Amino acid sequence: MKAGIVGSGKIVKECLRAIDGAAGVQAAAVCVREGSRSKGKELAEKHGIPLVCTDYEEFLKLDSLDIIYIGIINSMHYEYAKKALEHGKNVILEKPMTTSAAEMAQLAGIAKEKGVFLFEAITTLHYPTFAFIKEQISNIGDIKMVQCNFSQYSTRYDNYLAGVVQPVFDPKLYGGALYDINVYNLHFVTALFGRPEKISYHYNSGYNGVDTSGTLILEYPGMVASCTAAKDSYSPCFGVIQGTKGYVQVDGSVSLCTLARSVTDQGELTFACPEAASRMCFEWEAFADMYARKDLEECYKLLEHSVMVMELLEAARENAGLRLG
């Protein structure tokens, strides 16, 4: 599967490490803004990419590309993905896919109308460990509580405190903890337990109104899930699913799911994820496999889940009165 890469930032660098280490994938071109041409050339030289483009329309006309990966700021996801889909291109779109449920529904509709693949680049669901977790929760009785914490003091937070607002802390560009990292927790919980009956969001606000940290509360019949994410403070990252007969624990953020254990009165089972060149390798290999098998049905199942997550993100934001955009 030959991929065209859009962007030149931190996530694109991670993406290219994944492509270099993933089976069945090759980066065939990179598209950057004219002002970032030097960054594009640097990426191309480092990863053996034969072509650098600065015109997105011309980039989309390349017949050599099987799929387009879009790794740019959140506020531009919809525009770039829509153009690619309308050109009949398969698309991998970074999380969160869009800034609203309406945009998400429109992209999903175009993908299905054109009969093309549209994937969300979300690590959680494609780790081998996630399948282990999904299997083990049936052994721990009635699920009562779920706790997820993904906290990392952002490398950009000190700049933010000094008055330098980068995209990840800019509410106008849909930055903040909810859309940047709590989305992983939300994917994890809803992929296991489905849509909650209620969702609410409680957050710490920065000086420009951005949510620098916050907690999602998801309410299910007989179960409550608490999803915390912070870009302004430190905490161990973890995930715990608590049942009446035991628990399943993820060591570290559920965005990675590198190590999980299931503990019941029957004993303890541990699953350690195989090492990979990048945290994004597993998703890229999953996408390449679906593409090779032309499995649009599986793709669209994942897409419906992504639509639900976007609807819940929007509902949580509205519940909290968090103003983005």
Image (spheres, rainbow, N blue to C red):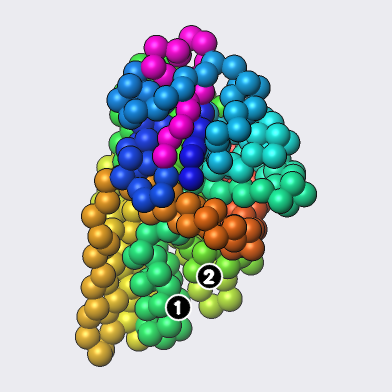
- Residue nearer the viewer, 25 or 74: 25
- Give the magenta-colored segment's residue range: 26-41
> Residue 300 location in percent, x, y?
64, 58
Is residue 39 located in the magenta-colored stretch of the structure? Answer: yes
Q: Which residue is mark 2?
A: 193
Looking at the rendering, in which quadrant would you find the C terminus? Answer: top right
Residue 162 in picture, x, y percent from top left: 36, 16
Judging depth in this view, the residue of 136 and 231 nearest the camera is 136
The residue sitting at 74% across, 46% down in the picture is 114
Labels 1 and 2 touching (C-beta < 8 A) = yes
Residue 248 quadrant: bottom left
At mark 2, the secondary structure is helix
Placement of 62 over or under 90, stated as above or below: above
Residue located 59% across and 24% down the image: 59
Give the left or right position of residue 263, taking residue 306 as reference: left
Report the residue marked by disc 1: 143
Per the image, label 1 sits on a secondary structure element best described as: strand
